[in-house]
Amino acid sequence: MPATADAPTAHPQMPSLEDMKRMADKKAEPLLAKLKTDPNNSDLLNQIGTLYKATHQFKEAAGYYQKAIDVEPKNVAARTDLASCLFYQGDADGAIHQLQQSLRYDPKDANSLFNLGMIRLQAKNDPSGAVTAWQQLLKLNPMLAEDKKAAFEKLIAQARKTKPNE
């Protein structure tokens, strides 16, 4: 079928990382303006971090999450997000440290336990460490939906089949 004026011939192009950064900067402008009058607002810092994380600007996001936990050290959600950013920047050890800190404040936090398992498996090739984290998640969160429990049990079974690097 020939192209018409109504039907584009090319597929829309995915935005580049630079495009995504510009979008995040634009969306962050009003939040950054508020931050000037309230620089220790942990929620605001976390929101800005989340904007940058969503657009794969992990270094910028990590900076805002770090500021949020400097203000509120027990902010488990911000620590977990910081850990993700560190992992995506190649700092698996830093990510694990942040997740361990999160678990000191909230030993049951499912997001921290899940991420800890994934990072141990993927970045550290530590399947037994991953299994331990996910078993802890299941044990400490008995009210998880059945489909989520099944997904974790499947991850545990797969990790058990993984051979760690010697």
Image (cartoon, rainbow, N blue to C red):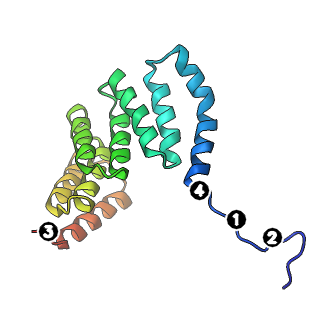
> Which amino acid lies under the numbered mark 4 shown in the image of this protein?
Ser
Q: Residues within 10 Å of mark 4 (few under 14, many from 20)?
A: few
As measured in the structure, the alpha-carbon distance from the residue carrying label 2 to the one carrying label 3 is 50 Å
Q: Which structural element holds mark 2?
A: loop
Reading the chain from its start, which is encountered first: label 3 or label 1? 1
Q: Nearer the viewer, mark 4 or mark 3?
A: 4
Q: Which structural element holds mark 1?
A: loop
Tag 3 residue: 165
In the orientation shown, which residue stands out farthest toward the left? 166
Tag 4 residue: 16
Q: Is residue 56 above or below residue 41?
A: below
Q: Which structural element holds mark 3?
A: loop
Q: Which structural element holds mark 4?
A: loop
Across and down, in percent, residue 122 comes to: 27, 61
Tag 2 residue: 8
Across and down, in percent, residue 7 comes to: 84, 71
The residue drawn where x is 36% and y is 58% is 148
In the orientation shown, which residue stands out farthest toward the bottom? 1
Across and down, in percent, residue 26 comes to: 64, 37
- Identify which residue, 94 or 100, lies in the foreground: 94
Reading the chain from its start, which is encountered first: label 2 or label 3? 2
The answer to which quarter of the image holds residue 109 is: top left
The C terminus: image quadrant: bottom left
As measured in the structure, the alpha-carbon distance from the residue carrying label 3 to the one carrying label 1 is 42 Å
Q: Is residue 126 left or right of residue 41?
A: left
Q: Can residue 160 be seen at all in this image of the molecule? A: yes
Cβ atoms under marks 2 and 1 closer than 8 Å: yes
Q: Which mark is residue 59?
A: none
Q: Is residue 29 left or right of residue 40?
A: right
